[in-house]
Image (cartoon, grey):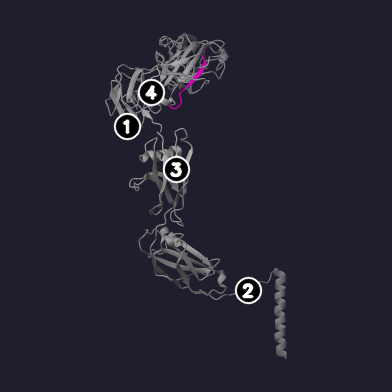
Amino acid sequence: MKHILKIFAAVIAIIGFTTGCNKVDNLTKVDALPVYAAGVSPVLSSSLTSVAPTIADTNTAVITFSWTDPKYGTDLSNTKYILTIDSTNKNFGAQNNTKTVFGVLKTTMTGRELNAYLLNIGFKVGVSQSIDLVLTSSYKNNNERYLSNVITVKVTPFADPSILVTQNTSVVCTLANGALPSNNFWWTPTFTGFTGTINYTLQYDSAGKNFVSPIEIPVGASLLTKGLTQSEMNATALNSGIPGGTTGKVEYRIKGVTSNGTTMYSNIVNVTITSYVPILRVYLPGGYQASTGNGNDWDPGTAPELIRDLRSAVFNKMYYIYIYLPAGAQFKITVGRDWAINYGGTGGNLSAGGANLSVGAAGFYRVSVDISALKYDIIAGRMGFVGGATGAGWNPPNVFPAYALGNSGTNLFVGLTNFTSGGWKLIDNNAWNSGSNTVDETRSYGTPSGDGGTLEVNGANFNDYTTAGRYRVIWDGRDRDNIKYFTSSGTEMRVVGDGINQAGVNDWDPPTSPQMTYTGNGIWTISITLKANKDIKFLAGNAWGAFDYEDNSGQSQATGVPKAIKWEGGNNFKTPAAAGTYTITLNENLQTVTIN
Protein backbone atom coordinates (compact mmCIF):
# COMPACT_ATOMS: atom_id res chain seq x y z
CA MET A 1 0.00 0.00 0.00
CA LYS A 2 2.78 2.39 0.89
CA HIS A 3 4.51 1.55 -2.43
CA ILE A 4 1.40 2.45 -4.46
CA LEU A 5 1.00 5.73 -2.55
CA LYS A 6 4.63 6.63 -3.28
CA ILE A 7 4.08 6.06 -7.02
CA PHE A 8 0.86 8.12 -6.95
CA ALA A 9 2.64 10.96 -5.12
CA ALA A 10 5.44 10.95 -7.66
CA VAL A 11 2.97 11.24 -10.51
CA ILE A 12 1.23 14.17 -8.78
CA ALA A 13 4.59 15.87 -8.28
CA ILE A 14 5.53 15.47 -11.94
CA ILE A 15 2.17 16.89 -13.04
CA GLY A 16 2.57 19.80 -10.67
CA PHE A 17 6.08 20.51 -11.88
CA THR A 18 4.96 20.41 -15.49
CA THR A 19 2.04 22.71 -14.83
CA GLY A 20 4.32 25.15 -13.09
CA CYS A 21 6.70 25.22 -16.07
CA ASN A 22 3.85 25.88 -18.49
CA LYS A 23 2.73 28.83 -16.44
CA VAL A 24 6.21 30.36 -16.39
CA ASP A 25 7.12 29.77 -20.10
CA ASN A 26 3.60 30.17 -21.53
CA LEU A 27 4.12 27.11 -23.76
CA THR A 28 1.30 25.35 -25.61
CA LYS A 29 1.09 21.65 -25.78
CA VAL A 30 1.66 20.22 -29.31
CA ASP A 31 0.66 16.74 -30.32
CA ALA A 32 3.46 14.58 -31.58
CA LEU A 33 3.67 14.18 -35.40
CA PRO A 34 2.60 10.83 -36.74
CA VAL A 35 5.34 8.52 -37.82
CA TYR A 36 4.93 6.64 -41.11
CA ALA A 37 6.84 3.66 -42.29
CA ALA A 38 9.34 4.29 -45.10
CA GLY A 39 8.28 3.46 -48.64
CA VAL A 40 10.07 1.30 -51.19
CA SER A 41 11.33 1.91 -54.74
CA PRO A 42 8.64 1.17 -57.33
CA VAL A 43 9.27 -1.33 -60.08
CA LEU A 44 8.56 0.10 -63.56
CA SER A 45 7.40 -2.03 -66.50
CA SER A 46 6.01 -1.50 -70.01
CA SER A 47 3.23 -3.23 -71.91
CA LEU A 48 5.48 -3.37 -74.98
CA THR A 49 9.19 -3.65 -75.63
CA SER A 50 8.84 -2.19 -79.11
CA VAL A 51 6.32 0.25 -80.59
CA ALA A 52 6.04 1.97 -83.99
CA PRO A 53 2.89 4.14 -84.05
CA THR A 54 1.54 5.79 -87.21
CA ILE A 55 -0.43 8.95 -87.90
CA ALA A 56 -3.57 6.82 -87.59
CA ASP A 57 -2.65 6.24 -83.93
CA THR A 58 -2.73 9.97 -83.18
CA ASN A 59 -5.48 9.67 -80.56
CA THR A 60 -5.12 5.95 -79.77
CA ALA A 61 -3.31 4.60 -76.71
CA VAL A 62 -0.33 2.68 -78.08
CA ILE A 63 1.65 1.81 -74.93
CA THR A 64 1.06 1.49 -71.18
CA PHE A 65 3.59 2.00 -68.41
CA SER A 66 2.84 0.60 -64.95
CA TRP A 67 4.67 0.32 -61.64
CA THR A 68 4.39 -1.36 -58.29
CA ASP A 69 3.05 0.41 -55.19
CA PRO A 70 5.89 2.27 -53.37
CA LYS A 71 3.95 1.56 -50.14
CA TYR A 72 3.93 5.01 -48.61
CA GLY A 73 2.26 5.32 -45.23
CA THR A 74 -0.74 7.26 -46.54
CA ASP A 75 -3.48 6.81 -49.07
CA LEU A 76 -2.40 6.34 -52.72
CA SER A 77 -4.14 9.61 -53.62
CA ASN A 78 -1.32 11.54 -51.90
CA THR A 79 1.37 10.18 -54.19
CA LYS A 80 3.01 11.61 -57.31
CA TYR A 81 4.86 9.85 -60.13
CA ILE A 82 7.17 11.42 -62.74
CA LEU A 83 8.05 9.32 -65.78
CA THR A 84 11.26 10.57 -67.42
CA ILE A 85 12.15 9.68 -71.02
CA ASP A 86 15.51 9.96 -72.79
CA SER A 87 17.67 8.29 -75.40
CA THR A 88 19.20 5.05 -74.21
CA ASN A 89 22.40 5.52 -72.18
CA LYS A 90 22.05 9.33 -72.11
CA ASN A 91 21.56 9.30 -68.31
CA PHE A 92 18.30 11.24 -68.54
CA GLY A 93 19.85 14.58 -69.45
CA ALA A 94 16.94 15.67 -71.65
CA GLN A 95 15.20 18.70 -70.17
CA ASN A 96 11.46 18.65 -69.43
CA ASN A 97 10.84 15.39 -71.27
CA THR A 98 8.63 14.02 -68.53
CA LYS A 99 5.07 12.98 -67.81
CA THR A 100 3.56 13.45 -64.33
CA VAL A 101 0.58 11.56 -62.88
CA PHE A 102 -0.98 11.47 -59.40
CA GLY A 103 -2.47 8.70 -57.30
CA VAL A 104 -2.38 5.91 -59.92
CA LEU A 105 -0.01 3.08 -60.71
CA LYS A 106 0.00 3.31 -64.52
CA THR A 107 -0.29 5.67 -67.47
CA THR A 108 -0.89 5.30 -71.18
CA MET A 109 0.39 7.33 -74.14
CA THR A 110 -1.34 8.01 -77.43
CA GLY A 111 0.63 7.75 -80.64
CA ARG A 112 0.93 11.57 -80.97
CA GLU A 113 1.87 11.99 -77.29
CA LEU A 114 4.67 9.43 -77.52
CA ASN A 115 5.76 10.92 -80.85
CA ALA A 116 6.16 14.38 -79.30
CA TYR A 117 8.41 13.00 -76.56
CA LEU A 118 10.55 11.28 -79.18
CA LEU A 119 10.86 14.43 -81.28
CA ASN A 120 11.77 16.45 -78.17
CA ILE A 121 14.89 14.33 -77.71
CA GLY A 122 15.82 14.61 -81.38
CA PHE A 123 14.80 11.25 -82.79
CA LYS A 124 14.52 10.96 -86.56
CA VAL A 125 11.22 10.19 -88.22
CA GLY A 126 10.94 6.61 -89.47
CA VAL A 127 14.13 5.45 -87.74
CA SER A 128 13.90 2.76 -85.04
CA GLN A 129 15.75 3.83 -81.86
CA SER A 130 15.73 3.00 -78.16
CA ILE A 131 14.56 5.05 -75.21
CA ASP A 132 15.22 4.59 -71.50
CA LEU A 133 12.50 5.34 -68.96
CA VAL A 134 12.71 5.76 -65.21
CA LEU A 135 10.03 6.58 -62.63
CA THR A 136 10.39 8.93 -59.66
CA SER A 137 7.81 8.40 -56.90
CA SER A 138 7.12 10.78 -54.00
CA TYR A 139 4.46 12.37 -51.90
CA LYS A 140 2.60 15.21 -53.63
CA ASN A 141 4.84 17.69 -51.81
CA ASN A 142 7.89 15.93 -53.34
CA ASN A 143 8.97 14.40 -50.02
CA GLU A 144 10.42 10.90 -49.80
CA ARG A 145 11.49 10.30 -53.38
CA TYR A 146 12.34 6.89 -54.76
CA LEU A 147 13.73 5.96 -58.15
CA SER A 148 12.53 2.90 -60.02
CA ASN A 149 14.50 0.58 -62.19
CA VAL A 150 15.33 1.72 -65.76
CA ILE A 151 13.53 0.05 -68.64
CA THR A 152 14.28 0.23 -72.35
CA VAL A 153 11.75 0.35 -75.20
CA LYS A 154 12.47 0.39 -78.93
CA VAL A 155 10.45 3.12 -80.70
CA THR A 156 9.96 4.56 -84.21
CA PRO A 157 8.66 8.16 -84.56
CA PHE A 158 6.20 8.90 -87.35
CA ALA A 159 5.68 11.89 -89.61
CA ASP A 160 3.17 14.38 -88.15
CA PRO A 161 3.06 17.31 -90.60
CA SER A 162 0.91 20.41 -90.55
CA ILE A 163 -2.48 20.36 -92.22
CA LEU A 164 -2.73 23.40 -94.53
CA VAL A 165 -5.99 25.15 -95.42
CA THR A 166 -6.51 28.04 -97.86
CA GLN A 167 -9.19 30.70 -97.40
CA ASN A 168 -9.83 30.89 -101.14
CA THR A 169 -9.26 28.42 -103.94
CA SER A 170 -9.55 31.16 -106.58
CA VAL A 171 -8.51 34.85 -106.45
CA VAL A 172 -8.47 37.76 -108.89
CA CYS A 173 -5.60 40.23 -108.47
CA THR A 174 -5.54 43.76 -109.89
CA LEU A 175 -2.89 46.44 -109.89
CA ALA A 176 -5.24 49.04 -108.43
CA ASN A 177 -5.99 46.79 -105.42
CA GLY A 178 -2.50 45.41 -104.99
CA ALA A 179 -2.27 46.53 -101.35
CA LEU A 180 -5.59 44.92 -100.34
CA PRO A 181 -5.83 41.48 -98.64
CA SER A 182 -6.25 38.59 -101.07
CA ASN A 183 -5.88 35.23 -99.33
CA ASN A 184 -5.12 33.70 -95.93
CA PHE A 185 -3.45 30.36 -95.22
CA TRP A 186 -3.85 28.47 -91.93
CA TRP A 187 -2.21 25.28 -90.68
CA THR A 188 -2.03 23.02 -87.67
CA PRO A 189 1.29 22.70 -85.78
CA THR A 190 3.94 20.41 -87.18
CA PHE A 191 4.42 17.62 -84.59
CA THR A 192 1.62 18.60 -82.24
CA GLY A 193 2.93 18.48 -78.66
CA PHE A 194 6.53 19.17 -79.60
CA THR A 195 7.83 21.62 -76.97
CA GLY A 196 10.72 23.12 -78.93
CA THR A 197 10.60 25.93 -81.50
CA ILE A 198 9.24 25.21 -84.96
CA ASN A 199 9.97 27.61 -87.83
CA TYR A 200 7.43 27.73 -90.63
CA THR A 201 7.83 28.64 -94.30
CA LEU A 202 5.13 28.91 -96.96
CA GLN A 203 6.40 27.31 -100.16
CA TYR A 204 4.84 27.59 -103.61
CA ASP A 205 5.37 26.34 -107.15
CA SER A 206 3.38 26.08 -110.36
CA ALA A 207 0.91 23.19 -110.45
CA GLY A 208 2.38 19.83 -111.34
CA LYS A 209 6.02 20.79 -110.70
CA ASN A 210 6.12 18.64 -107.51
CA PHE A 211 8.06 21.32 -105.64
CA VAL A 212 11.34 20.41 -107.29
CA SER A 213 12.46 24.06 -107.02
CA PRO A 214 9.94 25.76 -104.71
CA ILE A 215 10.00 29.46 -103.86
CA GLU A 216 9.71 30.31 -100.19
CA ILE A 217 7.94 32.99 -98.17
CA PRO A 218 9.30 33.06 -94.58
CA VAL A 219 6.63 32.98 -91.88
CA GLY A 220 8.54 32.68 -88.58
CA ALA A 221 8.61 30.67 -85.37
CA SER A 222 5.43 29.18 -83.95
CA LEU A 223 3.11 31.17 -86.27
CA LEU A 224 0.19 29.26 -87.74
CA THR A 225 -1.22 31.71 -90.29
CA LYS A 226 -0.03 33.83 -93.21
CA GLY A 227 -2.00 36.44 -95.11
CA LEU A 228 -1.01 37.66 -98.58
CA THR A 229 -2.10 40.83 -100.38
CA GLN A 230 -3.20 40.88 -104.01
CA SER A 231 0.26 42.11 -104.94
CA GLU A 232 1.90 39.22 -103.05
CA MET A 233 -0.45 36.62 -104.51
CA ASN A 234 0.21 38.11 -107.94
CA ALA A 235 3.93 37.73 -107.36
CA THR A 236 3.49 34.03 -106.56
CA ALA A 237 1.68 33.65 -109.87
CA LEU A 238 4.30 35.52 -111.89
CA ASN A 239 7.15 33.66 -110.16
CA SER A 240 5.41 30.38 -110.97
CA GLY A 241 5.40 31.20 -114.68
CA ILE A 242 1.86 32.57 -115.01
CA PRO A 243 2.16 35.69 -117.24
CA GLY A 244 0.53 38.93 -116.13
CA GLY A 245 -3.03 39.23 -117.39
CA THR A 246 -3.65 35.47 -117.51
CA THR A 247 -5.03 32.81 -115.19
CA GLY A 248 -3.18 29.82 -113.79
CA LYS A 249 -2.89 27.49 -110.80
CA VAL A 250 -0.29 27.73 -108.03
CA GLU A 251 0.40 25.05 -105.41
CA TYR A 252 1.26 25.90 -101.79
CA ARG A 253 2.52 23.90 -98.83
CA ILE A 254 3.96 24.54 -95.37
CA LYS A 255 7.46 23.52 -94.40
CA GLY A 256 8.00 23.08 -90.65
CA VAL A 257 11.50 22.75 -89.24
CA THR A 258 11.93 21.81 -85.57
CA SER A 259 14.67 23.23 -83.39
CA ASN A 260 16.50 19.90 -83.60
CA GLY A 261 16.48 19.94 -87.39
CA THR A 262 13.58 17.70 -88.35
CA THR A 263 11.83 18.98 -91.50
CA MET A 264 8.26 18.13 -92.42
CA TYR A 265 5.97 19.25 -95.28
CA SER A 266 2.21 19.70 -95.13
CA ASN A 267 -0.43 18.70 -97.63
CA ILE A 268 -0.63 20.75 -100.86
CA VAL A 269 -3.41 23.24 -101.57
CA ASN A 270 -4.15 24.81 -104.96
CA VAL A 271 -5.19 28.38 -105.71
CA THR A 272 -6.24 29.57 -109.16
CA ILE A 273 -4.96 33.12 -109.69
CA THR A 274 -5.92 35.72 -112.25
CA SER A 275 -2.75 37.83 -112.43
CA TYR A 276 -1.86 41.32 -113.61
CA VAL A 277 1.23 42.96 -115.02
CA PRO A 278 3.03 44.51 -112.01
CA ILE A 279 4.71 47.89 -111.84
CA LEU A 280 8.01 47.75 -113.66
CA ARG A 281 10.90 49.84 -112.36
CA VAL A 282 13.51 51.19 -114.76
CA TYR A 283 17.00 52.47 -113.90
CA LEU A 284 19.88 54.30 -115.58
CA PRO A 285 23.24 52.71 -114.63
CA GLY A 286 26.36 54.04 -116.31
CA GLY A 287 29.88 55.38 -116.07
CA TYR A 288 28.63 58.80 -114.96
CA GLN A 289 27.23 57.71 -111.58
CA ALA A 290 30.16 58.21 -109.21
CA SER A 291 31.21 61.59 -110.62
CA THR A 292 27.69 63.03 -110.36
CA GLY A 293 26.69 61.65 -106.95
CA ASN A 294 24.36 59.02 -108.39
CA GLY A 295 25.84 55.92 -106.77
CA ASN A 296 28.56 53.62 -108.03
CA ASP A 297 29.55 53.44 -111.69
CA TRP A 298 27.66 50.84 -113.70
CA ASP A 299 25.73 49.73 -110.63
CA PRO A 300 21.96 49.22 -111.14
CA GLY A 301 21.57 48.86 -107.39
CA THR A 302 22.48 52.53 -106.82
CA ALA A 303 21.49 54.01 -110.19
CA PRO A 304 18.81 56.72 -110.42
CA GLU A 305 15.29 55.53 -111.18
CA LEU A 306 13.32 56.84 -114.16
CA ILE A 307 9.87 58.34 -113.68
CA ARG A 308 6.97 56.10 -114.67
CA ASP A 309 4.60 57.73 -117.15
CA LEU A 310 1.23 56.98 -115.57
CA ARG A 311 -0.92 57.63 -118.64
CA SER A 312 -2.95 54.49 -119.33
CA ALA A 313 -1.80 54.19 -122.95
CA VAL A 314 1.87 54.00 -121.95
CA PHE A 315 1.62 52.63 -118.41
CA ASN A 316 4.48 50.23 -117.60
CA LYS A 317 5.95 51.09 -121.01
CA MET A 318 7.14 54.72 -121.01
CA TYR A 319 9.78 56.01 -118.59
CA TYR A 320 11.84 59.19 -118.48
CA ILE A 321 14.29 61.16 -116.37
CA TYR A 322 15.67 64.71 -116.27
CA ILE A 323 19.30 64.41 -115.27
CA TYR A 324 22.71 66.06 -115.55
CA LEU A 325 25.20 64.00 -117.58
CA PRO A 326 28.89 64.86 -118.04
CA ALA A 327 30.50 65.02 -121.47
CA GLY A 328 30.83 61.62 -123.10
CA ALA A 329 28.72 59.88 -120.46
CA GLN A 330 27.73 56.31 -121.31
CA PHE A 331 24.84 54.43 -119.78
CA LYS A 332 22.24 51.71 -120.28
CA ILE A 333 18.67 50.92 -119.22
CA THR A 334 17.81 48.12 -116.78
CA VAL A 335 14.41 46.81 -115.71
CA GLY A 336 15.01 46.15 -112.04
CA ARG A 337 18.11 46.75 -109.99
CA ASP A 338 20.27 44.15 -111.69
CA TRP A 339 21.53 43.33 -115.18
CA ALA A 340 19.07 40.51 -115.84
CA ILE A 341 17.04 42.71 -118.21
CA ASN A 342 19.09 45.49 -119.76
CA TYR A 343 18.89 47.55 -122.94
CA GLY A 344 21.24 49.60 -125.03
CA GLY A 345 20.94 50.65 -128.63
CA THR A 346 21.60 53.06 -131.46
CA GLY A 347 19.59 55.41 -133.66
CA GLY A 348 16.64 55.59 -131.27
CA ASN A 349 16.15 51.83 -131.17
CA LEU A 350 16.67 49.77 -128.01
CA SER A 351 17.87 46.21 -128.03
CA ALA A 352 18.40 43.70 -125.25
CA GLY A 353 22.03 43.84 -124.16
CA GLY A 354 22.72 46.42 -126.90
CA ALA A 355 25.47 49.04 -127.20
CA ASN A 356 25.86 51.72 -124.52
CA LEU A 357 23.80 54.87 -124.93
CA SER A 358 25.76 58.13 -124.66
CA VAL A 359 25.74 61.93 -124.84
CA GLY A 360 28.38 64.23 -126.32
CA ALA A 361 28.36 67.50 -124.36
CA ALA A 362 27.81 67.94 -120.64
CA GLY A 363 24.39 69.19 -119.60
CA PHE A 364 20.90 68.40 -118.39
CA TYR A 365 19.12 65.83 -120.53
CA ARG A 366 15.71 64.23 -120.77
CA VAL A 367 16.22 60.50 -121.39
CA SER A 368 12.99 58.75 -122.45
CA VAL A 369 12.52 55.05 -123.16
CA ASP A 370 9.64 52.83 -124.26
CA ILE A 371 10.52 49.32 -123.10
CA SER A 372 7.55 47.87 -124.98
CA ALA A 373 8.20 49.48 -128.37
CA LEU A 374 11.98 49.33 -127.71
CA LYS A 375 12.57 53.01 -128.48
CA TYR A 376 14.60 55.74 -126.79
CA ASP A 377 15.01 59.50 -127.11
CA ILE A 378 17.59 61.88 -125.61
CA ILE A 379 16.94 65.65 -125.75
CA ALA A 380 17.71 68.70 -123.60
CA GLY A 381 16.28 68.36 -120.12
CA ARG A 382 14.37 71.55 -119.39
CA MET A 383 11.13 72.92 -117.99
CA GLY A 384 9.38 76.23 -118.72
CA PHE A 385 6.29 78.35 -118.09
CA VAL A 386 3.62 78.49 -120.80
CA GLY A 387 0.07 79.82 -120.89
CA GLY A 388 -2.07 82.91 -121.04
CA ALA A 389 -1.04 83.86 -117.50
CA THR A 390 2.66 83.91 -118.46
CA GLY A 391 4.82 86.07 -120.68
CA ALA A 392 5.20 83.21 -123.17
CA GLY A 393 1.47 82.97 -123.84
CA TRP A 394 0.10 79.71 -125.18
CA ASN A 395 3.00 79.50 -127.62
CA PRO A 396 5.68 76.89 -126.72
CA PRO A 397 8.34 78.34 -129.08
CA ASN A 398 8.34 81.45 -126.87
CA VAL A 399 9.15 79.52 -123.69
CA PHE A 400 12.88 78.83 -123.92
CA PRO A 401 15.07 80.40 -122.73
CA ALA A 402 13.16 83.48 -121.49
CA TYR A 403 10.59 81.61 -119.39
CA ALA A 404 12.60 78.57 -118.35
CA LEU A 405 12.90 77.17 -114.85
CA GLY A 406 16.35 76.35 -113.55
CA ASN A 407 17.78 72.80 -113.51
CA SER A 408 18.27 72.26 -109.79
CA GLY A 409 18.95 68.54 -109.70
CA THR A 410 17.79 65.18 -111.01
CA ASN A 411 14.06 65.52 -111.74
CA LEU A 412 13.97 68.91 -110.03
CA PHE A 413 13.32 72.39 -111.47
CA VAL A 414 12.89 75.77 -109.74
CA GLY A 415 11.93 79.04 -111.42
CA LEU A 416 10.33 82.45 -110.93
CA THR A 417 8.17 84.39 -113.37
CA ASN A 418 5.37 86.97 -113.44
CA PHE A 419 1.81 85.70 -113.61
CA THR A 420 -1.40 87.43 -114.64
CA SER A 421 -4.57 85.51 -115.59
CA GLY A 422 -5.47 83.15 -118.40
CA GLY A 423 -4.27 79.78 -117.10
CA TRP A 424 -0.84 78.20 -117.35
CA LYS A 425 1.11 74.95 -117.52
CA LEU A 426 4.67 73.68 -117.33
CA ILE A 427 6.25 72.25 -120.48
CA ASP A 428 9.54 70.52 -121.32
CA ASN A 429 9.80 71.29 -125.06
CA ASN A 430 9.10 74.03 -127.60
CA ALA A 431 6.09 72.29 -129.18
CA TRP A 432 2.82 70.91 -127.90
CA ASN A 433 2.28 67.22 -127.33
CA SER A 434 1.13 65.59 -130.56
CA GLY A 435 -0.79 62.75 -128.95
CA SER A 436 1.53 60.18 -130.50
CA ASN A 437 2.52 58.58 -127.16
CA THR A 438 6.03 58.14 -128.51
CA VAL A 439 9.31 58.69 -126.68
CA ASP A 440 10.12 61.95 -128.48
CA GLU A 441 6.89 63.82 -127.81
CA THR A 442 6.59 66.83 -125.50
CA ARG A 443 5.39 66.46 -121.95
CA SER A 444 3.36 69.28 -120.48
CA TYR A 445 2.18 69.25 -116.88
CA GLY A 446 -0.80 70.64 -115.04
CA THR A 447 -3.36 69.99 -112.34
CA PRO A 448 -6.32 71.82 -110.85
CA SER A 449 -5.01 70.88 -107.39
CA GLY A 450 -3.34 73.52 -105.27
CA ASP A 451 0.20 73.79 -103.93
CA GLY A 452 1.71 70.34 -103.39
CA GLY A 453 -0.71 68.70 -105.82
CA THR A 454 0.13 65.72 -108.01
CA LEU A 455 1.00 66.64 -111.59
CA GLU A 456 -0.39 64.88 -114.63
CA VAL A 457 1.25 64.60 -118.03
CA ASN A 458 -0.91 66.70 -120.38
CA GLY A 459 -3.16 67.38 -117.41
CA ALA A 460 -5.56 70.25 -116.79
CA ASN A 461 -4.29 73.83 -116.52
CA PHE A 462 -3.05 75.20 -113.24
CA ASN A 463 -5.44 77.66 -111.61
CA ASP A 464 -4.65 81.34 -111.90
CA TYR A 465 -3.11 83.06 -108.89
CA THR A 466 -5.61 85.17 -106.98
CA THR A 467 -3.22 88.11 -107.10
CA ALA A 468 -1.08 88.82 -110.13
CA GLY A 469 2.66 89.05 -109.49
CA ARG A 470 5.93 87.14 -109.38
CA TYR A 471 5.77 83.59 -108.04
CA ARG A 472 8.21 80.78 -107.44
CA VAL A 473 7.33 77.34 -108.85
CA ILE A 474 9.08 74.06 -108.06
CA TRP A 475 8.59 71.04 -110.34
CA ASP A 476 9.50 68.09 -108.12
CA GLY A 477 9.83 64.60 -109.59
CA ARG A 478 12.13 63.17 -106.91
CA ASP A 479 9.31 60.86 -105.84
CA ARG A 480 9.16 58.78 -109.03
CA ASP A 481 5.61 57.69 -108.23
CA ASN A 482 4.19 61.13 -107.48
CA ILE A 483 5.38 64.21 -109.39
CA LYS A 484 4.35 67.32 -107.45
CA TYR A 485 4.61 71.06 -107.67
CA PHE A 486 5.06 73.71 -105.02
CA THR A 487 4.51 77.43 -105.34
CA SER A 488 5.21 80.49 -103.19
CA SER A 489 5.45 84.24 -103.50
CA GLY A 490 8.53 85.52 -105.33
CA THR A 491 8.10 89.23 -104.66
CA GLU A 492 10.91 89.56 -102.16
CA MET A 493 13.96 87.89 -100.64
CA ARG A 494 15.57 88.99 -97.38
CA VAL A 495 18.85 88.22 -95.66
CA VAL A 496 18.18 87.41 -92.00
CA GLY A 497 20.46 86.32 -89.16
CA ASP A 498 22.90 87.55 -86.55
CA GLY A 499 25.70 88.12 -89.06
CA ILE A 500 24.41 91.45 -90.49
CA ASN A 501 26.27 94.59 -89.40
CA GLN A 502 23.94 97.37 -90.53
CA ALA A 503 22.10 100.06 -88.61
CA GLY A 504 18.49 99.24 -87.82
CA VAL A 505 18.83 95.50 -88.52
CA ASN A 506 17.98 93.31 -85.57
CA ASP A 507 19.29 89.77 -85.20
CA TRP A 508 16.95 87.21 -86.73
CA ASP A 509 14.24 89.80 -87.26
CA PRO A 510 12.59 89.51 -90.72
CA PRO A 511 10.82 92.92 -90.72
CA THR A 512 14.09 94.83 -90.21
CA SER A 513 16.23 92.56 -92.37
CA PRO A 514 17.51 93.97 -95.71
CA GLN A 515 15.83 93.03 -98.97
CA MET A 516 17.70 91.72 -101.99
CA THR A 517 17.16 93.00 -105.54
CA TYR A 518 15.67 90.68 -108.19
CA THR A 519 17.53 90.89 -111.51
CA GLY A 520 15.64 88.19 -113.42
CA ASN A 521 16.20 84.53 -114.23
CA GLY A 522 15.89 83.60 -110.57
CA ILE A 523 18.79 85.82 -109.48
CA TRP A 524 18.81 88.06 -106.38
CA THR A 525 21.67 90.34 -105.31
CA ILE A 526 22.60 92.62 -102.41
CA SER A 527 25.66 94.49 -101.10
CA ILE A 528 25.79 94.11 -97.36
CA THR A 529 28.15 94.46 -94.40
CA LEU A 530 28.63 91.16 -92.60
CA LYS A 531 30.06 90.21 -89.24
CA ALA A 532 32.65 87.44 -89.18
CA ASN A 533 31.78 83.82 -88.32
CA LYS A 534 28.09 84.41 -87.75
CA ASP A 535 24.90 82.98 -89.29
CA ILE A 536 22.52 84.06 -92.05
CA LYS A 537 19.78 82.54 -94.20
CA PHE A 538 17.44 83.74 -96.96
CA LEU A 539 13.73 84.35 -96.36
CA ALA A 540 11.18 85.09 -99.11
CA GLY A 541 9.02 87.35 -96.93
CA ASN A 542 8.95 89.70 -93.97
CA ALA A 543 7.82 87.11 -91.41
CA TRP A 544 8.83 83.62 -90.36
CA GLY A 545 6.90 80.92 -92.16
CA ALA A 546 7.72 82.27 -95.59
CA PHE A 547 9.72 80.15 -98.04
CA ASP A 548 13.40 80.11 -97.08
CA TYR A 549 16.79 78.75 -98.16
CA GLU A 550 19.35 77.02 -95.94
CA ASP A 551 22.91 75.88 -96.49
CA ASN A 552 23.67 72.72 -98.47
CA SER A 553 27.44 73.14 -98.68
CA GLY A 554 28.46 71.94 -95.23
CA GLN A 555 28.57 75.57 -93.94
CA SER A 556 31.51 76.49 -96.13
CA GLN A 557 32.84 80.00 -95.47
CA ALA A 558 34.60 80.23 -98.84
CA THR A 559 34.04 83.40 -100.87
CA GLY A 560 33.86 83.84 -104.60
CA VAL A 561 32.54 80.34 -105.27
CA PRO A 562 28.93 79.15 -105.65
CA LYS A 563 27.65 77.15 -102.70
CA ALA A 564 24.68 74.77 -102.83
CA ILE A 565 21.42 75.78 -101.18
CA LYS A 566 18.25 73.89 -100.22
CA TRP A 567 14.76 74.67 -98.96
CA GLU A 568 13.82 71.51 -97.07
CA GLY A 569 15.46 72.60 -93.82
CA GLY A 570 19.08 72.53 -92.71
CA ASN A 571 21.91 74.54 -91.21
CA ASN A 572 22.31 78.30 -91.54
CA PHE A 573 24.95 79.77 -93.80
CA LYS A 574 28.18 80.82 -92.08
CA THR A 575 29.41 84.32 -92.83
CA PRO A 576 33.03 84.70 -94.04
CA ALA A 577 35.90 84.47 -91.58
CA ALA A 578 36.64 88.19 -92.08
CA ALA A 579 34.09 90.96 -91.43
CA GLY A 580 33.44 93.42 -94.24
CA THR A 581 31.17 94.49 -97.07
CA TYR A 582 30.21 91.70 -99.47
CA THR A 583 28.05 91.20 -102.54
CA ILE A 584 25.72 88.23 -102.20
CA THR A 585 24.21 86.59 -105.29
CA LEU A 586 21.42 84.08 -104.73
CA ASN A 587 20.60 82.08 -107.88
CA GLU A 588 17.38 80.13 -107.39
CA ASN A 589 17.50 78.61 -110.86
CA LEU A 590 20.93 77.10 -110.21
CA GLN A 591 20.24 76.64 -106.47
CA THR A 592 23.49 78.37 -105.44
CA VAL A 593 24.64 81.35 -103.40
CA THR A 594 27.90 83.22 -103.94
CA ILE A 595 29.47 85.69 -101.49
CA ASN A 596 32.11 88.04 -102.95
Quadrant for residue 232, please give it.
top left
User: Which numbered mark, 3 or 2, is in the foreground of this view?
Assistant: 3
**Label 4 secondary element:** strand
For the residues bearing labels 3 and 2, Cβ distance under 8 angstroms: no
Q: In the displayed structure, would residue 436 be above or below residue 302?
A: above
**Residue matched to label 2:** 32
Residue kind at label 2, given as amino acid type:
Ala
Check if residue 491 falls in the magenta segment: yes
Whether residue 166 is visible here, answered yes or no, is yes
For the residues bearing labels 3 and 1, Cβ distance under 8 angstroms: no
**Residue matched to label 1:** 341
Q: Which residues are magenta?
A: 480-493
**Which numbered circle lies on residue 292?**
none
Q: CA distance from mark 2 to mark 4?
A: 98 Å
**Label 1 secondary element:** loop
**Label 3 secondary element:** strand
Query: Is disc 1 surrounded by few (<14), some (14 to 19) or many (20+) residues within 10 Å?
Result: few
